[in-house]
Image (cartoon, grey):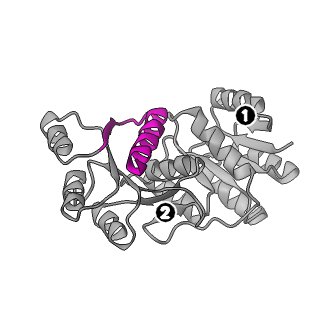
Amino acid sequence: MITILIVDDDQMNCDLLQTVLTRHGYRVMTCTSGREGLQLFRKHAPRITLLDLRMPEMDGLTVLKEIRATDPEAPVIILGGGATEVQENQARSLRVTDFVRRGLSLDILVEAVHRVSQLPVRANPAPSSPVTAVGGQDAGESVLIVDDDPLIRDLLVQFLSVRGYRAFGVADGHEALRVVQESAPDLIILDMILPGLSGIEVLQALRDSEYPGGVIIMTGSHNEEMLEEAWALGPQEILGKPIALDRLLTAVQLVLVCREC
């Protein structure tokens, strides 16, 4: 039975995650302090560690550094709620396996755990390129996610990759257009609010270049004029943030099926 260690100073979170993961067949240990977490990690060598970054006394980054000193390849999934961008970047530099932001569906966390548990222990260096890719040459249709929020971008890449899509992520519109020019993906999931080129400007450039794939817009904006401008450029769907992942998956499936038709 695969062992999972949960290190989180919120006892309620520990209990909830233990209940959910136990139902999926995992052996789960929990603790509410970094020091105890390290003791359990060194004693039991769990297959996967779920680690909160913000904890009193010994924070998650310190725990992660000690884990890396003990086992440089140990899979660690960060529970990222409340962490600063600096903390998240430091965690990435220590080669975390995945990030899961609090508030998202528990299904995302369970899927991340399933995915990691089925892979051999491997190095997972922080990405040095602005493009994040998951999936091999034999994966399914290609999907490009364009979002300047690294956690949302990475989570969507992982969410789609475990469903057989060849998923990539970039942080801005200029990089998205470069990727499309080099090798046009089957579908683009495009945030409407981006630094530099806006999502609407990216979509206009795609239309000018006669990009043949589908486009799904993501936005947290309720500006009717902006939404009308986006719809006028012919995306297949516009989804509001926060994204309902089941609705996103349905939209992706429909767009790709219609493209094949």
Position of residue 188 in the picture relative to residue 151 (left or right): left
Q: Secondary structure at mark 2?
A: strand
Which residue is at 43% across, 48% downward? 256
Which residue is at 49% across, 63% downward? 132
Which residue is at 38% across, 49% downward? 259
Identify the residue under disc 1: 21
Residue 59 visible within the image: no
Question: Looking at numbered disc 1 in the image, what kind of residue is underneath it?
Answer: Leu
Indicate whether 25 appears above or below 121. Answer: above
* Quarter of the image that includes the N terminus: top right
Q: In the figure, residue 62 lies in which quadrant? A: bottom right
Identify the residue under disc 2: 132
Estimate the x, y position of residue 126 in percent, counting from the top left: 55, 66
Q: Secondary structure at mark 1?
A: helix
Q: Counting residues from the N terminus, which is met first, the one under dot 2 or under dot 1?
A: 1
Q: Residues within 10 Å of mark 2 (few under 14, many from 20)?
A: some
Q: Are marks 2 and 1 in contact (CB under 8 Å)?
A: no
Estimate the x, y position of residue 58 in percent, counting from the top left: 65, 48
Indicate whether 17 appears above or below 226. Answer: above
What's drawn in magenta, residue-wise? 236-261
Of residues 208 and 177, the one drawn nearer to the viewer in this rendering: 208
Estimate the x, y position of residue 175 in percent, counting from the top left: 33, 67
Residue 260: say if magenta.
yes
Position of residue 196 in the picture relative to residue 240 (left or right): left
Estimate the x, y position of residue 147 in percent, counting from the top left: 36, 53
Main secondary structure of the magenta stretch: helix
Which residue is at 32% across, 71% downward? 181
